[in-house]
Amino acid sequence: MEYVKRPLRAATTPAAQRFYLSTFLVIAVSTILLFLAAASYSVAYYSYVPKKVVSIPVHLQYNAGLNPFGVTSLQKDLMLETAYDVTVTLTLPRSPPNTERGNFMIALFATRSSLDNPAQSFGLVQDPYKHMSASNVVFTSRRPALVPYTDPLVSLTSRLLFLAWHVVAPASEKVVLAVPMGELVEFREQLPLSLLLDVQAGQTFQVYEAQIELVARLEGLRWMMYNHRVISFVAGTLLFWGVEITSFGLVLSVLAFCLGWTRESEEVPAIEQDGYKVDRGDGRAVVKRENRAESTVAESSKEDKGQDRAVKSEEEEAYERFIKEESIERDLPPRRIGYGEDDEGEGTGNIYGRG
């Protein structure tokens, strides 16, 4: 049973419990910081990488001027110092007025101020060009456009061949006209707030729908983050996580130094518990019961050796004293004793010695 109890005692010591608690806290804090790093990268991604394609519908106004025009407000998806390709897309019917119109011009203006959208106004439509000035316009462009030409004979043959299909699934005949209005358009100081689209083809020009499309030209880090999102997410999250872990460690070190946690742990004496000598400062089992017994035996042996040395030294001193006394008596001259005297000098003879 001792072989079973000994590991259990070692696993339930205060040092082991502190180790378990420290491991749990480290794992919990690391997990929380990992989720925070992922959230931080997501916020940084949407703050740094612009939206790739921004499509803005434009509602053209007829019978309000020489040409159909429309005003729209820009969304907040644009970013400064980002190059955009601007395109105006018109969906047109292939009607005789459109095919016979020939070339026409499309004008686009981007303004600093927010213009009133006539599509949302109850009053009369005002002249849109009254707000156009050099100080208010951020970007302007005028480009030509033309409805694609189709040979009448080819068109008639196509109708005859697909007549049954057109009868079963009737659909309007339309053409999508995409007119590039600007390449690598970049806004450095201020983003435009409104766009004015003017289709300079007269009031007879027919349009199904119109929209303005801005496509961002991504470069460098933005291109990497947009086209390789998984790799960028993993790398960015690990980078944020490493910075958070390093900062957390530095903060703990500064707090430990300022509050004196290190000095207090060094001054705490060791205690004995369950046969172990445990240092409460670092929480490690230092000496076991067997080691303590060995140290006790060593101390007792040292005491016995000290007593033996003391006895030997006393015997040597007594022997040296005896040798010295004998040498002193040996060096004295011999004493002569007279006849009839004993050792004390008293006479012991008879009458024959007198007279």
Image: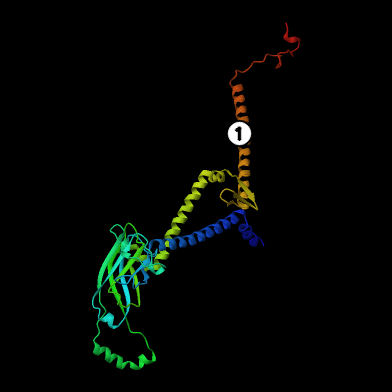
| Residue 162: % across, % down | 32, 92
Q: How many marks?
A: 1
| Residue 262: % across, % down | 53, 45
The one of 199 and 293 positioned closer to us in this rendering: 199
Q: Is residue 169 above or below residue 98?
A: below
Q: Residue furthest front?
A: 124
| Residue 304: % across, % down | 63, 41
Whether residue 237 appears in this view of the structure is no
Image quarter of the C terminus: top right
**Residue drawn at 24 percent across, 82 percent down:** 149
| Badge 1 amino acid | Ser
* Secondary structure beneath label 1: helix
**Residue drawn at 28 percent across, 81 percent down:** 97
Whether residue 242 appears in this view of the structure is yes
Q: Give the colour scheme of this rendering.
A: rainbow
From the image, tell me which residue sits under label 1.
Answer: 313
Asked whether, in this view, residue 153 is left or right of residue 280, the answer is: left
**Residue drawn at 49 percent across, 62 percent down:** 35
Q: Is residue 294 above or below residue 219?
A: above
The one of 313 and 134 positioned closer to us in this rendering: 134
Image quarter of the N terminus: bottom right
Q: Residue furthest right?
A: 351
Location of residue 120 by image quarter: bottom left
Asked whether, in this view, residue 136 is left or right of residue 300, the answer is: left
Location of residue 117 by image quarter: bottom left
| Residue 21: % across, % down | 58, 57
Asked whether, in this view, residue 144 is left or right of residue 328, the answer is: left
